[in-house]
Image: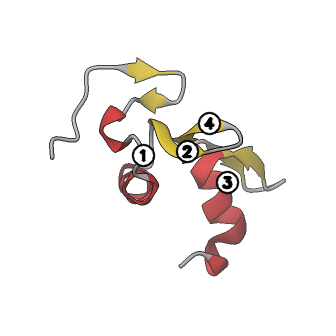
Amino acid sequence: MNFTNNKTGVFGPIYNQFQNQPKLAIKHLLKVQNGECPKALFREDIGFIDIVWGKNDPKTNKGYGLKHIVEKHGQNIK
């Protein structure tokens, strides 16, 4: 699978190839540590969810996205 793209969004490179594939989207964002995967997850009650790499402030541990989750709860992620 080709992981290059020509689009950049608010959160960095956009990886459209992971739609409805949350595990692959998370694995890819953990590897590249930048960008977003639109429509990576779907929940019946709220619809599509984008997964973004995001940001985290190590001093306050406040942020958003996968980076924040990993840095705040990394020891619990399997």
Tell me the kind of residue under disc 2.
Answer: Phe
User: Which residue is at a point 59% across and 53% down the rendered structure image?
Assistant: 67
Vertical comparison of 76 with 68: above or below: below
Mark 1 element type = loop
Mark 3 element type = helix
Name the N-terminal-most of marks 1 and 2: 1
Residue 1 rendering spot, x and y as whole percentages = 15, 47
Residue 4 rendering spot, x and y as whole percentages = 21, 34
User: Which residue is at a point 64% across and 79% down the rendered structure image?
Assistant: 75
Q: Nearer the viewer, mark 4 or mark 3?
A: 4
How far apart marks 2 and 4 lie (CA) works out to 5 Å
Tell me the kind of residue under disc 3.
Answer: His
Labels 1 & 2 near each other (Cβ < 8 A): yes
Mark 2 element type = strand
Q: What residue is pinned by disc 1?
A: 20
Labels 3 & 2 near each other (Cβ < 8 A): no
User: Which residue is at a point 69% across and 70% down the rendered structure image?
Assistant: 73
Name the N-terminal-most of marks 3 and 2: 2
Q: Which mark is residue 71?
A: none
Q: What residue is pinned by disc 2?
A: 42
Q: Neighbour class for label 2 at 10 Å: few (<14), some, many (≥20)?
A: some
Q: What residue is pinned by disc 3?
A: 68
Tell me the kind of residue under disc 1.
Answer: Asn
How far apart marks 4 and 3 lie (CA) works out to 23 Å
Labels 1 & 4 near each other (Cβ < 8 A): no
User: Which residue is at a point 35% across and 33% down the rendered structure image?
Assistant: 16
Mark 4 element type = strand
Q: Nearer the viewer, mark 3 or mark 1?
A: 1
Residue 35 rendering spot, x and y as whole percentages = 45, 36
How far apart marks 1 and 4 lie (CA) works out to 11 Å
Q: Which mark is residue 47?
A: 4
Residue 74 rendering spot, x and y as whole percentages = 62, 72
